[in-house]
Image: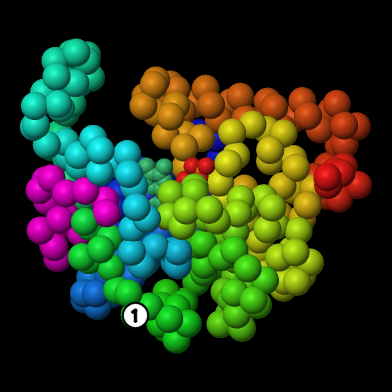
Amino acid sequence: KFGTFFGISSLATVSLAEIGESISSPKLFQLYVHKDKGLNAALIQAAKDAKFDALALTVDTIVSGKRERCLHTGFTSPPRLTPSSAISFATHPGWTLNYLGRERFSLPNLESHVAAGTDAAISVADYFNTMLDQTMDWAMAEQIRSQWGGPFCLKGVMSVEDARRAVDIGATAIMVSNHGGRQLDGSRAPFDQLAEIVDAVGDRIEVICDGGITRGTHVLKALSVGAKACSGGRLYLYALAAGGQRGVERTLANLSAEIERGMKLMGVTRLDQLGRGNLRWR
Ligand SMILES: Cc1cc2nc3c(=O)[nH]c(=O)nc-3n(C[C@H](O)[C@H](O)[C@H](O)COP(=O)(O)O)c2cc1C
């Protein structure tokens, strides 16, 4: 509805084919490199068949970060019945009825290849640590780019050196991202890395600022530094959890209005008028 680029993960709960049939705005598929090469090839082919516009290869997650809150709560997808989750289900009846009344949880893009694609309860950390290929390197990234053959983004670049190598392997774009701060503890914020990366490669590759975006003014700041676009996860996920489709629509409407209002208040009529002069670094 909002005409934004829309991305789904390898671990999405809706199949690439179904998204291809139902969504006409630009679509991005995020690929994790699995140990199972047949699965990687099948995912790339499914994204091509569903006419996805771009592929983003995530490079900051060959293993899971230590997600202590998940370890503490025992969180899995789908949720497992344990004494503490039973209490949680009982005290959130609206959520529980909604969950039980829906189609069963599955990861349709994986289910033809791996048991984790079915409704087996597994933690994200277990999935990453057992399924993903820890030998992923630049040669593999280049091979995936050529297998895909279309607009190609490396997701999870945080240094100038890696940004330069992304240009060398022919990537169209990079997402400056620390995976929402969910992977390497203590990593810098993507926004703080943006200026030096834009200065090094911004004329040769599209730089997307991924993470920490919750306000239109955050978008304006990132574009002022030189990002071509912004992306995010929790921005829409919190809205989805709290208000379903209406929640996401409200968030996107707010974001759009905030961008427009911010531009008017700054006296800016076009995005290309945004520049570093809008910001002061302390
Ligand atoms: C619940 C959740 C699931 C995510 N799953 C994936 C994923 O499967 N693949 C991926 O590349 N990034 C994934 N991410 C990271 C997001 O793509 C994005 O980099 C991050 O959320 C940006 O930070 P933000 O949440 O502050 O916007 C996930 C993030 C969240 C919060």
Provide the residue span drawn in magenta.
Answer: 109-125
Picture layout, residue 31 above or below residue 281: below
Residue corresponding to mark 1? 135
Q: Give me the residue at 68% from left, 58% from top.
A: 193
- Residue 41: x and y in percent read 28, 74
The magenta stretch spans residue 108? no
Per the image, label 1 sits on a secondary structure element best described as loop
Q: What amino acid is at disc 1?
A: Thr
Q: Is residue 112 left or right of residue 49?
A: left
Q: Is residue 39 left or right of residue 220?
A: left
Quadrant in the picture for the C terminus? top right
The rendered magenta stretch, by its main secondary structure, is classed as: loop
Q: Give me the residue at 68% from left, 33% from top.
A: 216
The answer to whether one can see residue 152 in this image is yes
Q: Quadrant of residue 69?
A: top left
Q: How is the image coloured?
A: rainbow
Q: Give me the residue at 22% from left, 66% from top.
A: 131
80 or 215, which is in the foreground? 80
- Residue 46: x and y in percent read 29, 64
